[in-house]
Amino acid sequence: MGGAEQEDGWRRGRFRFLPVVPGRMEFAAEVRRAVLAHRPSRIAVELPRTLKAATLRAVSRLPEVSVILYPDKSGQDAVYVPVEITDPFMEALRSGHEVKAALHFVEPDLDRPAHPPENYPDSYAVRRIGYTKYVESWLACPRPAGHQLRRQAQGMAWRLQALPGRQIVWVVLSLSLFPLVLEALEKPQAEPLAHQRRTGVQVLNLHPECLAEVLLEPPFFQAVYERCRQPSRSGKAKTVEPDPPPGPDKQPFRVITSGVEDPLQSLESIVERTARRVRWRAKSPRRANASEENAPVAGIGSIDRQRMVFRLLAESESRYGSATGEKVSHWQRRLLARYARNLAFLDRQLVAGLFDLTVSARSVVDDNYAWDLWELAGGAPHQRVQSDLMTVRISGEELYANMRRIQLRRRLPRRKARVRPYGLRGRRRESAPGEWARQFDGTGICSYPPEDLVLEDYGAFLKKKGKSVLSAERSRVEVFKTSLLDGIDVRETLRNWHQGQLYVRENQRVSGEVGAVVVVFDEDRENRYHWCTTWLGEHAQESDMAFYSTNPYERIVGPGIARAEYGGFLLSYPPRRMLDVWQDPDYGMAESKAETLLLAGLDYTLESLVVYVAARPPRSVFRTVASRMGRKIVYLPIGQLSPVSLKKIRVVHVLDGFDKRPTAKDYIW
């Protein structure tokens, strides 16, 4: 089955086979490409004849997603079969209908789940190595087949052998059944003992809010796929009208005008933008004897799942910024990508799925971003609550076993949810524009003491964490002999469990203490944080501080009170020693504000260790500078720290004199 046999599919007599992975978008595109390129007159699919009428009814409703419901053999439980846009079998039926091919359902109804789960390699490999190599790699590693799977393959072979005529039949079937069907076609087969018809079969409309749990591919991906498979907006694609408004008796108020964008229109715009940016190009159909596997055909091109994931994250970030006013930093994007990749590798996948992406978004950013990601990924502009069929809401537990759960707590400010004592006034406002700005006389500035306490506490935490990280780097692991030392090393013991030995860890003491802490939120390559200053500690428990931030005078929040955002800061203890680091010529080698703070930290610290927190480690030259000064830089990736804690310390308020401190609590939030 190699070489020329695979130029137009795997052949066996008058049959041409298209083995696929059920429910995966890449294989749906391959099926559509083959059908539109060769325009077969007959197509056979791995679907039971007992559900043919219901399946064709559900396929005719696409892109509206349906679910087929029928009772199981006990009659007490129900079997749900979702009909998805990106399922290759449904795509074979849709594309076959376009080319006016005869459709045959050849799977015997043996009371088995439709397309039982199988551990296939990630379908994204089709985009990288090609469809043919993917199938060849699967066939190169034969897997043992059970009795039920062989019965199903023999029943399909009997159906195929019973098809009349000598015309070429294109067969779309699962990869797991492909070699078994080829083997069964070598000899005549008997009719299997299977259901000839089923009663109580229903086609139902799925509620839009349950699509993300029920469908194999995210609804957002399916919407993009549906938009891309249409050559143009003016094509004959099925359009669905929005839900009708409630009747006059249920609508006491009438909206005259509104400037708020409709969520459905917003979702359609996002789908349209994504479809233009996933390298899907409509070109002329290729010839039937063409050898280029990934050539686009009639609106079908090369689908890039990674680009879809990137666009999903980018659009979710935009929604997150609009809803919360926060933004996702570049180091958070990089850490989220690495975290999602590792989760995908644990599941033996190349690209992370929706659940792994949601977990990564919640862990790296916060629950609000994860909520926006899940909500956008579960959005389908073609799905409606109002339908000609009964609409049902189904949970994932009803369809799949061992469902994974994630709990998101959306934390958005809600006015009605705040606890407000009776008679409490709201936040104070200016009686006239510019009133608060005129109260800045420029004689001196100071900080807000409650914020100083939070910042000092976090600086102490970073000092302890930096020293513990350095201690962990110098720890020693050895096989247990006579002493447990500092305890059992569980990780090393499990890694060498096959040896039957116990490993223990010895933590070596780190000499020296941490004297300075440098935290860099943004290296500021675009000079957004252009306000640079140095503050001296007011008492013995407060550090000297140098920082760069946004211009506080661009955001006046009270009389003589301004609000800014740190780009980075330096804490050095003991206080009252620091000069203006931004004008010091000794730091001329620094190429950025972050490097200036690091050089100042090495220069002013009285201890041997300096903690440096940033998205990237410092340049190697700073290691040399530190060693010549008798110092050591302890680098902590900012992604390892809690984003919630970082948000608390990133805001700074600048007061125009000590006399503003008693009233500052009424204006600072």
Image: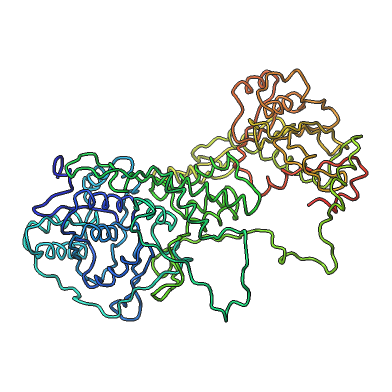
Q: Residue 255: x percent and y percent?
A: 62, 68
Q: Looking at the image, which residue is at 29% across and 56% down?
A: 88
Quadrant position of residue 485: top right
Q: Residue 491: x percent and y percent?
A: 49, 44
Q: Which of these two is toward me, 25 or 591?
A: 25
Q: Residue 291: x percent and y percent?
A: 20, 39
Q: Is residue 16 shown left or right of residue 337? A: left
Way the structure is coloured: rainbow
Q: Which of these two is toward me, 202 or 261?
A: 261
Q: Looking at the image, which residue is at 24% across and 39% down?
A: 292
Q: Looking at the image, which residue is at 71% across and 26% down?
A: 596
Q: Residue furthest right?
A: 659
Quarter of the image for the N terminus: give it: top left
Q: Is residue 53 shown left or right of residue 273? A: left
Q: Is residue 355 visible?
A: yes
Q: Residue 276: x percent and y percent?
A: 43, 45
Q: Looking at the image, which residue is at 25% across and 71% down?
A: 51
Q: Which of these two is toward me, 111 or 5?
A: 5
Q: Is residue 514 visible?
A: no
Counting labels gives 0
> Considering only vertical position in the picture, is 470 above or below 98?
above
Q: Which of these two is toward me, 199 or 556?
A: 556
